[in-house]
Amino acid sequence: MEMQKKMKKVGFHMNILMGFSLSLFLSLTNTLQAEKPTLNVWLMSFGVSAVISFALSFLMPMKKAEDKVVGALGLTENKCASRLVSTAVSDFIYTPVITFAMVLLVRYLVMQESHGMAQLPPFPIMFIKSFIVSFIVAYCIIYLINRPMLKVVLKMNGISPELIDNPKKAVEKI
């Protein structure tokens, strides 16, 4: 029972840290794609993105969703193929929602700033362009930082980071 509580805390901390990291990088990426990137726009998009990320992480338990897809594909946990699939699952859940909200926000801010005079491309074009870039960036971020972050979070919660690389050996130590 004690280990189950610790793992719930690990999941909570991972949701917070991954949500924060994705929000940071996606809002920065999308802001830098703008014609005139400003600190104000970045801060607002980061705030909106963070709120959405945290809401998604509590509404949709990522680990369970990832494990179901990995299991359905018959992949072995903690192998490269399963990590690639897990990353894609997280990316498909987070990126469309965050990108949609950020494109809406940027359109709104640009129209406010220009007093409705801005000539913007149609929403679908803005969304698709932003989504493609965001999807690639988010995929790389999730893939690269998930394991190192998980090791830190496990250690913070008094669990051996060996659990990631060798679950059987780590369970024997418990």
Image: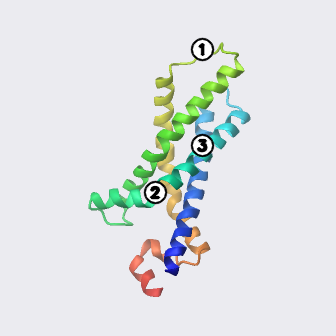
Q: Is 160 displayed left or right of 74 in the figure?
A: right
Residue type for callout 3: Ser
Mark 2 and mark 3 residues within 8 Å of each other at the beta carbon? no
Specify the amino acid type for callout 2.
Met
Task: Residue 13: give its label.
Answer: none
Decide: few, some or many residues near mark 2? Use Cα within 10 Å; few <14, some 14-19, many ≥20. Answer: many
The residues tagged by marks 1 and 3 sit, at their Cα atoms, a distance apart of 25 Å
Query: In the figure, residue 63 lies in which quadrant?
Result: bottom left
Q: Counting residues from the N terminus, which is met first, the one under dot 1 or under dot 3?
A: 3
The x, y position of residue 132, in whole percent, is 46, 35
Q: Which mark is residue 49?
A: 3
Say whether marks 2 and 1 touch (CB < 8 Å).
Answer: no
Secondary structure under badge 1? Answer: loop
Name which residue lies at 45% across and 51% down. 90
The label on residue 119 is 1
> Which label's residue is closer to the chain start, 2 or 3?
3
Q: Secondary structure at mark 2?
A: helix
